[in-house]
Image (tube, helix red, strand yellow):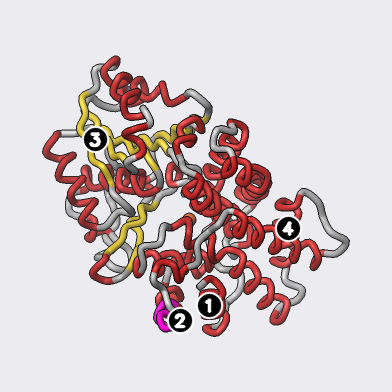
Amino acid sequence: MVKFEFYTAGRIIYGRGEFDRIGDLVAGFGHKAMIVLGGEFLRTSGIVDRLAENLDAHKVGRTYYLVKGEPQISTIDEALDEARSAGCDVVIGIGGGSAIDTAKAVAGLLTNGGSALDYMEVIGAGKPLTKPAMPMIAVPTTAGTGAEVTRNAVIGYKEKHFKASMRSFYLIPRVALVDPALTHTMPPEVTASTGLDALTQVIEPYVSNHAQPLTDGLALTGIRLAARSLRQAYENGDDENARDEMSLAALMGGICLANAGLGAVHGFAAPLGAAFPIPHGVVCAALLPHVMAANVAALRKDDPNSPVLTRYADVGQALLGYRMATEDATIDAGIEFVTNLVRDLHIPKLSEFGMTEADIPDLVERAKRASSMRYNPVRLSDEALADILRKAL
Ligand SMILES: [Fe+2]
């Protein structure tokens, strides 16, 4: 019997040019906005000026917080102090996953009190949020994390070499405002890594042991969109159709992962991202082909009639746009498609960030405890997990 639960942002607005509705949307929630910005490139792209004009037109006051790199506990607490002292009653997160997750955490803490660590899974006290967050609007400027529709905020804790989440239904943004025109500011290497994160986030939920009917269709559509548009968006950042499709794929990925879970790629992402200065998208991109190959090899060996293998063939078909003569051939061609895409988008090796063979045993141990690993469709042995890392070195 199928059982599932489905949730997403209460309102999703998607479309080129829709960013100019921001002032009107914010004014519906409050008078003083906490604006969490990510990435210096926002400052030069005119997005912040447009935001300011829009808020002025609706008489909304504001204060800014710039997130540098992926958020740490200290980042959240600093942004929270700023929002509290400015008396903010609405929060906007604009940028990639780092800015949006910071904004989500700040919105939750503004109404619930305390500090991020009180509510963190795995590394903190894990207290539940008991009150709805301050209204929050998420505006992605990358096409990757899907953080605009998820209920967790990924936060790093340097002292413990770990990344974990604050997680609550109350953290789902009130509005996800997805305007693909904002993603044109991404340089090619960011397009590549965030885009491969998006691709991972439509593949892992589809083969997850928590997959469900409402996300299956979105996942397959998302795979098709990313497979045909990521290369184009990378090669020509002003290709509107490619940018539109990547924003849609990323949004679908967020909906899928929030409801169906992820897998071993994301199981590794938390400990690797905490131990080395590797952007999340790069970790996902570097590991995705190897995790697909390891999962398929383990299933073929331990459970050759597993329906998950049929799902991997569906993934292959969505990537390729056609089916090969046999299920096995379609699966293998799908893995090859992803391998070639990662190579052609020039994703760096993990060793370029300082990781060595000696780090593998510890990373394997940490990855086994990560929350995403429990959704991987097959239990991978320590040797198989170590082998995945070795191949991405
Ligand atoms: Fe991801």
- The label shown at residue 357 is 2
Q: Tell me residue 96's x, y (percent).
A: 40, 44
Q: Residues within 10 Å of mark 4 (few under 14, many from 20)?
A: many
Labels 3, 2: front one: 2
Residue at 47% x, 48% y is 190
Tag 1: residue type?
Arg
Tag 1–tag 3 contact (CB < 8 Å)? no
Q: Which residue is mark 1?
A: 390
Residue at 15% x, 34% y is 87
Element type where label 2 sits in the image: helix
Tag 3: residue type?
Met
Question: Which corner quadrant of the image does residue 356 belong to?
Answer: bottom left
Toward the viewer: 79 or 133? Answer: 79
Q: Residues within 10 Å of mark 3 (few under 14, many from 20)?
A: many
Q: Can residue 326 be seen?
A: yes
Tag 2: residue type?
Glu
Q: Which residue is mark 4?
A: 316
Element type where label 1 sits in the image: helix
Chain-order first, disc 2 or disc 4 = 4
Q: What distance separates the C-alpha of mark 3 from that of mark 4?
A: 43 Å
Residue at 27% x, 35% y is 35
Tag 2–tag 1 contact (CB < 8 Å)? yes
Q: Which residue is mark 3?
A: 34
Q: Tell me residue 170's x, y (percent).
A: 35, 46
Q: Tell me residue 348's x, y (percent).
A: 50, 62
Q: Residues within 10 Å of mark 1 (few under 14, many from 20)?
A: some
